[in-house]
Amino acid sequence: MKPYVLAHGAVTKDQRYPGNDPDDKRYKRRYLAEGDSWFSLGGVPYENLLMELDLPARAVIVNIAESGDEIVRMASPSRVKAFTRLVVRKATAYEWDAILLSGGGNDLIDRAGAILRSGSTVDACINQTELAKCMREVATAYRALAEIRDGANSVNAGVPMIAHTYDYPTPRNAPALFFGSKVRGPWLFDAFSEKQIDENLWVPVADRLMAALAETILGLATGPRRIAQFSVVETRNTLDRAELGSTKKSGDWRNEIHPWKGGYAKLAARLATAIPA
């Protein structure tokens, strides 16, 4: 059953729009989603991972995700206010069955210019100091959101948080398009080109970066410093890879860093298995 994905701004207690009230008794489950363009509404075309979920019970997902957002910004004092209102404060929060998170991809991509460097091998093309710094910031931001969830008198202390890894994008000149015109991007392609990295190294270098991000997020759910009630869905190697040199939809990717509807459906199938029914 497809959930109703509701923009935060449309939430209302107005009885004329009962479906826009997360407390409407017709909903058996309520989820909050915070994240980036893999979750956000208003994309072009209108598609995301959440809209492809198939859940066993009727559910609403209140969505505060923003296209292009970074997990570091989601946890920043100015950006985290909406999250705090909906999660912590009794007067404004809802009792969520889970909090879904999508973050870290843009943090890595936006810092690619500092992380990448010219080199003749995969290792030589990566500034390990900058990569490690980025990964620490990503981990700290996830921990900050969990600390807010578990704050004093929080309505949702201990509610499950579910994050995901990403998949392996192919650096290529494939921007997001709207009626054939460039809207945003490409992203990695520009950074790899600027650093004059040999094209034969683009895929293995990009894979190494995405693997570092995946292991960072997965690491938050394991070990002695694991975040309580925090799980991560492994989504690497889910999508058919885009062809190097392609400039439009290829494999399961609509553009360089975003899947198309069918790709999101594959990812959603994995995410759905971890969401409390």
Image (tube, rainbow, N blue to C red):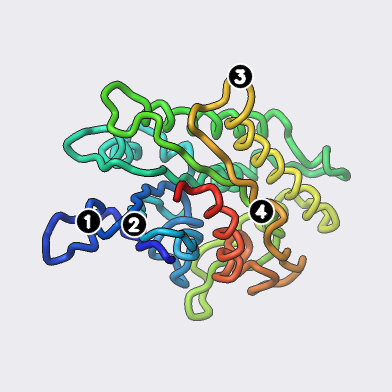
Which residue type carries mark 2? Val
The residue sitting at 88% across, 45% down in the picture is: 120
| Residue 254 locus on image (x, y percent) | 60, 70
User: What's the distance in space between the residues labelled 1 and 4, CA to CA?
Assistant: 35 Å
The 10 Å Cα crowd at callout 1, few under 14, some 14 to 19, many 20 or more, is some
In this figure, which residue is indicated by the disc labeled 2? 60
In this figure, which residue is indicated by the disc labeled 3? 224
| Residue 15 locus on image (x, y percent) | 11, 62
Q: Nearer the viewer, mark 3 or mark 1?
A: 1
Q: CB under 8 Å between callouts 1 and 4?
A: no
In this figure, which residue is indicated by the disc labeled 4? 167
User: What's the distance in space between the residues labelled 2 and 4, CA to CA?
Assistant: 26 Å
In this figure, which residue is indicated by the disc labeled 1? 24
The residue sitting at 83% across, 43% down in the picture is: 122
The 10 Å Cα crowd at callout 2, few under 14, some 14 to 19, many 20 or more, is many
The residue sitting at 61% across, 56% down in the picture is: 187
Q: CB under 8 Å between callouts 1 and 2?
A: yes
Q: Single out the residue that lies furthest toward the bottom.
A: 179
Circle 3 — which element? loop
User: What's the distance in space between the residues labelled 1 and 2, CA to CA?
Assistant: 9 Å
Q: Nearer the viewer, mark 1 or mark 4?
A: 1
Which residue type carries mark 3? Pro
